[in-house]
Amino acid sequence: MPSFGLIQTPEHLTRRIDTDRFGPFVFEIGIEIAQAGLALQRVEDAHERFVASPLSQVANQLEREVVVSSVFGTNTIEGGTLSEDETATVLALDPVQIKEIEQRRAVNIKAAYDLSQQAATTPGWVLNQEFILELHRLICQDIPHPDNRPGQIRDNPRNRVTFVGDEAHGGRYKPPQFGKDIERLLGGLTDWHSTLQQAEIPALIRAPLVHLYFERIHPFWDGNGRVGRVIEATLLQTAGYRYAPFALARYYLAHIDDYFTLFNTCRKLAEKTRSAPNQPFIEFHLEGMRQTINTLHDRVNRLVTILLFASDIRRALDEKTINARQYTIVSQLMDKGRPLPLAEIRHAPWYTSLYFKRNDKTKQRDLKQLREMELVFLDTGNRLWPGFIRPGDIKPLSKKESQSP
């Protein structure tokens, strides 16, 4: 495990690039790494616990959930209108079925994720300009825009000025406008990242720094936020962090005002030559990683609990400890993922078909046995819960959560 507190930040890790029209642009670590040591260590500790959990048992389910949640998160940050359920539906479609622009936005992000995962598992892969342009091409293909060209750097005509941000999030910023300046800075960013990597600066520092400076360069007319978050996720994945790099998009969405404001906060601190100008964004990122990893860890534990419970009730049916009617009742509760009022259950078509031509005594006996075996629980509100959730312990699962891997 790295000894974060001993990492030095020598002057050669600061890079100044002079441009033709924008003026000087400085890449710097801009944090007190020793001060960030505790936050770094907390992320590492959380990740170690996470990867030691029974991931293999639920990896496919977790992967699907993270992709949907992350695509929804990063797309919504940039104005996408699909709900999370709609995003899941779109990502399951055959490509020929994609007709609407909003659907295309989601599918494009998934394509960029696929490229990212391929890069992260390629030995010797390094961040370069070609990778960034390809990400942009994938994210923006077939999405109409008056100026944006997929995979091409922005080059503003003299009568067009690009601004980033708004007064509600710290003010407006005028990024480089001239295409050759942007190309030079993008190359400088990837070279600078390689220098940080050679100096063994942790990915938990490098990745958000690249994200921060990429957004400051703002190399494209559209898609910069989506590209920047995928770049960040790729660098974290390459360093061995699993699932959390993409899932982090949901943290950014949940704290969207802070996320947008911190880009301006760090830029203004740097313009005033304050020490550690990038510290606020790095600390924000580290807390996001810690919370995201812990959330994923909890999710794995819950998925495994559901998996074991599903196995238990199947075995009980096979061993004739419960009958087919009882098995159906418990399975329906698992599928709903929430406590069901007994009155609602008794009027459900599936339930009435189970007890067609059977009397109330049979119904009561079946339910009593399930409760005695703790395969279901009945709360004070006369609601029935699946046996892997004790009433009052935790909130009920959503339907998506309740589905067994």
Image: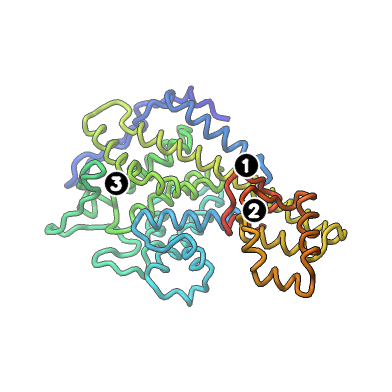
Q: Which amino acid does label 3 sit on?
A: Leu
Query: Does residue 111 appear to the left or right of 46 in the view shown?
Result: left
* Earlier-in-chain disc, 2 versus 1: 2
Q: Label 3: few (<14), some or many (≥20) within 10 Å? A: many
In this rendering, is residue 184 above or below 324? Answer: above
Give whichever of 357, 83 is nearer the camera: 357
Q: What residue type is labelled 2?
A: Asn
SS at mark 2 in the image? loop
Q: Can residue 87 be seen in this view?
A: yes
Q: Give the quarter of the figure containing the C terminus.
A: bottom right
SS at mark 1 in the image? loop
Give whichever of 402, 206 is nearer the camera: 402
Q: Which amino acid does label 1 sit on?
A: Asp
Q: Label 1: few (<14), some or many (≥20) within 10 Å? A: few
Residue topped by disc 3 = 185
Relative image position of residue 57 (x, y in whole percent): 69, 51
Which label was assigned to residue 343?
Answer: none
Residue topped by disc 2 = 382
Relative image position of residue 50 (x, y in whole percent): 61, 40
Residue topped by disc 1 = 393
Q: Give the quarter of the figure containing the N terminus.
A: top right
Name the residue: 70% across, 68% down.
Answer: 351
Name the residue: 63% across, 54% down.
Answer: 383
In this rendering, is residue 156 above or below 280? Answer: below
Name the residue: 67% across, 62% down.
Answer: 332
